Amino acid sequence: IHFKSPEAVKPLVQELSLRDCRLHALEGLERLGPLARSEAMVPLTALLESREEGWVRAMAARLLASLGQGEAIGPLRRALEADHSEVQAAAAASLRQDSFREHASEVLPVLARLEVESRSPLVRQQARWSRRWFQAPKPGTEEARAFESATFEAWEERRRSAEHCPTVTRREGGSEVKTAHEVLLLHHFRWREPPPETKGACLGQPELEWATFLEPLGGMCLIGQSEGFGGGLSLSGQGARTVLRWGVSADVALRLHGHFVVLTSTPHLHLPEGELLRIDRTVSGTWVAVPWVTLPGSWEGYAYDTQGNLVVATESPPEPIYDGVAAEPECTYDMVRITRDGQLEDFTPRESSLPGAQPL
């Protein structure tokens, strides 16, 4: 794979049908790029249109768009109306390629509807960005200047009507979230303070620089690290250490509906990002960190609702500049809920409260 050998394509395509191997196969095909196009298009389309988990279909959508280019418009158009927010958001984001421009009339009505009607702020965000990308005229023309004036007025109107948006303030003990109805105090990652607790399989682990947590997991020790400009997630035990993910800040390990999940972030970048990794064990006994849920920005605080779902406050990234001017996001902060099946949706405290709208 690392040497981009055509001989690696067929085994990776075969692995797509094996549940325990899908993450490895999708990541491998992504590295191979155009080499995989001829053999991977059909199985990737089948995977995208299957009933597999949202994160699997989302990865298939992104890979299908990069390999198939314009030929992938049909499956991606259908994926915009999938039954899972992760798939819809990935499909919307994948459309921002020149090879799809000629298909604007096919996707713009769907993007416009998702931007208004979706319950997921991530889907609304990606639909808005792609809609703006398709509609933006060539910079420097009279049409572009008129477009910039019209869109600026629309953003000003949105800013005036942003009273529904939550605000987040970090303070001692957590992140204070003010909504139109309540004030909540969510848990927040306290960087390196206090030092991670060691217990179980993590006892006797050598002290690691920038460690954020040490959690026993199946006879091994799950280790999170944050270095300010990166970090990673690894497993240590039985005389070996396995890196599960690198280049992200692994901030907090949590339990969610029987799974270990890890909140990650890259808040130092110009476009702050956040993700929820799920730690899965394969049939062979190895552990993998699957990219379960993409957040609409870097996370600012978390709690659980009364059904045991994870509630996260996120900070939105700046809007991309597609039309010569930068837009303000729909809301600077979002309150989102992550459900048992990895769906991401708006969280409204008034409708579905946390265990007490007060400090946790």
Image (spheres, grey):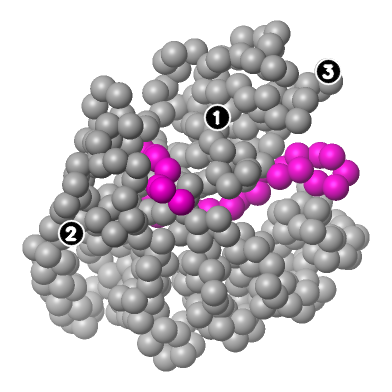
Which residue is pictured at 28% across the width and 70% down the height? 323
What count of labels does the image hold? 3
Neighbours of disc 1 within 10 Å: few (<14), some (14-19), many (20+): many
Q: Mark 2 points at which residue?
A: 164
Q: Which of marks 1 and 2 is nearer the N terminus?
A: 2
Note whether 88 is above or below 289 in the view shown. Answer: below
Distance from label 1 to label 2 (Cα)? 35 Å
Determine whether 333 is above or below 164 in the image: above
Q: Is residue 23 left or right of residue 223?
A: right
Q: How far apart are marks 2 and 3 (CA)?
A: 52 Å
321 vs 169: above or below: below
Figure quadrant of the C terminus: top left
Q: Which residues are drawn in magenta?
A: 280-307
* SS at mark 2 in the image: helix
Q: Name the N-terminal-most of marks 1 and 3.
A: 1
Secondary structure found at label 3? loop
Check residue 62 for magenta coloring: no
Q: Which mark is residue 239?
A: 3
Q: Looking at the image, is mark 1 or mark 2 nearer the viewer?
A: 2
Q: In this view, does 262 lie above or below 90?
A: above
Q: What element carries label 1?
A: strand
Q: What residue type is labelled 3?
A: Gly
Question: Where residue 179 appears, x then y in whole percent?
Answer: 20, 50
Callout 1 amino acid: Gly
